[in-house]
Image (cartoon, grey):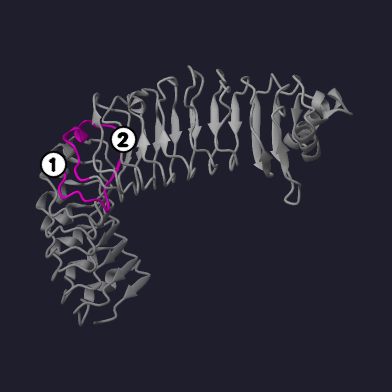
Amino acid sequence: MHDLLEEMGKDIVYQESPNDPGERSRLWFHDDVYHVLTENTGTSKITGIKVELPKDSDVICLSGITFSKMRNLRLFIHRSGCFSGVLEYLPNSLRVVDWPDCPFESLPSNFNPIKLAVLSMPECRITRILEGFKLLKHLTSINLRNCEYLTKVPDLSGIPNLQTLDVMECKNLVEVHHSVGFLDKLEEFSLNRCSSLSIFPTTASWNSLRSLWLYDCKRLESLTEIVNKMQSIELLNLCGSGIKELPSWIGYLTSLRELDVSGTPIKELPSSIGGLISLKVLAVFGTHIEELPSSVGDLTSLIGLVVSKSLITKLPSWIGYLTSLRELDVSGTPTKELPSSIGDLTSLTKLDVSETLITELPSSIGGLTSLTELNVSETPIKEMPSSIGYLTSLKRLIVSGTLIEELPSSIGNLIGLKSLHVQRL
């Protein structure tokens, strides 16, 4: 039914002007699109263009007047096809510009689309964007992902309703203008792999922000000072960034569900982290953190805790308070023992203590009745406690590379066990 309606709609548009595509309201058939854009036959009747040319199509050569007569063009979408020539004019009537891989270095200086709602130009050659624009109160989404020549996110104070800003993988992006910090409608801000980024707003009032991605921003050393409690944010990813310290205001982020500081120079977590009452996942993989603050024990909503490859030497007894925890990864740390309170983690499904210095497991481990995977490989453990027989949900047990010579007879009670790895050192 949908295909039928689509074909009927296309036929109606075709009948608007069977012989002259430039007189139709919408263009999508590749021959018509190519003809109108190369022969400059567009008119004010055109409201939408979708460029989707076959792979063997000729290059579309734009001229200074290609779009000059399309005064009512609202939608321009590019899916396939190559452009050359010059881009001297775009209609100010545009509301959606979806132009991946645009070959032009900038938008026309006289382009001021006051009703623009979506600007999506990933993987393009643009070097500057939106500079000098007046108020664009309808613009809600900007996607400039992987624009390798972009060096700066300019003053965006004229875009007060922006909700999504994606500049991830812009490897030469150095600066984000301070005005971005006061876009209080901003919900999604992605800067992953902006490896040159070093200048960032020093203060921010992101009342609506839900996610902030700073993954692999290696030159960014400090976080913004927040002037409100940013209670809408759910995800903060600092993995692989140059951030050296988590500020105390982190505890105000009461809606935060995921915090990832893996691979950063951070050496300690602030005690205020205990205020993250909604936190589900905490990852400090590969950091220089030696111990977790006791306030982490207050994170009763936590379901995933990853401290692998960190410098943590001991899991504290309060770990047993994390009764919602499902996955605990301590692998590759200098941890020497597990506290007996670990047996209180009745929701735990995966426990990984491989490549640690742990020599024995506490008998309380039998309390992990939900555990489905246990990995103690590459540790100096000599024997498994008989209480392992109580792990009736266990499906995978990895004890390879240990000093264990014999497993307890109670292992026969593990009726659900499907995988057992027992290779010795």
- Amino acid carrying label 2: it is Phe
Task: Look at 19% across and 32% down and name the residue there.
Answer: 249
Label 1 vs 2, first from the N-terminus: 2
Badge 1 crowding class, 10 Å Cα cut-off, few under 14, some 14 to 19, many 20 or more, is some
Residue placed under numbered mark 1 in the picture: 295
Position of 376 relative to 109 (above/below) = below
Badge 2 crowding class, 10 Å Cα cut-off, few under 14, some 14 to 19, many 20 or more, is many
> Whole-percent x and y of residue 101?
59, 43
Q: Residue furthest right?
A: 19
Structural distance between the alpha carbons of marks 1 and 2: 30 Å
Task: Look at 76% across and 47% down and name the residue there.
Answer: 57
> Whole-percent x and y of residue 19?
89, 29
- Amino acid carrying label 1: it is Ser
Determine the image quadrant of residue 277.
top left
Front residue of 117/390: it is 117
Position of 413 relative to 291 (above/below) = below
Task: Look at 24% across and 24% down and name the residue there.
Answer: 227
Residue placed under numbered mark 2 in the picture: 200
> Whole-percent x and y of residue 348?
26, 54
Magenta span contains residue 261: yes
Helix, strand or loop for disc 2 = loop
The magenta region covers 244-269
Magenta span contains residue 212: no
Determine the image quadrant of residue 59.
top right
Image quarter (top left, top right, bottom left or bottom right) of the N terminus: top right
Image quarter (top left, top right, bottom left or bottom right) of the C terminus: bottom left
Tell me the chief SS of the magenta region: loop
Determine the image quadrant of residue 340.
bottom left
Eye-nearest disc, 1 or 2 = 2
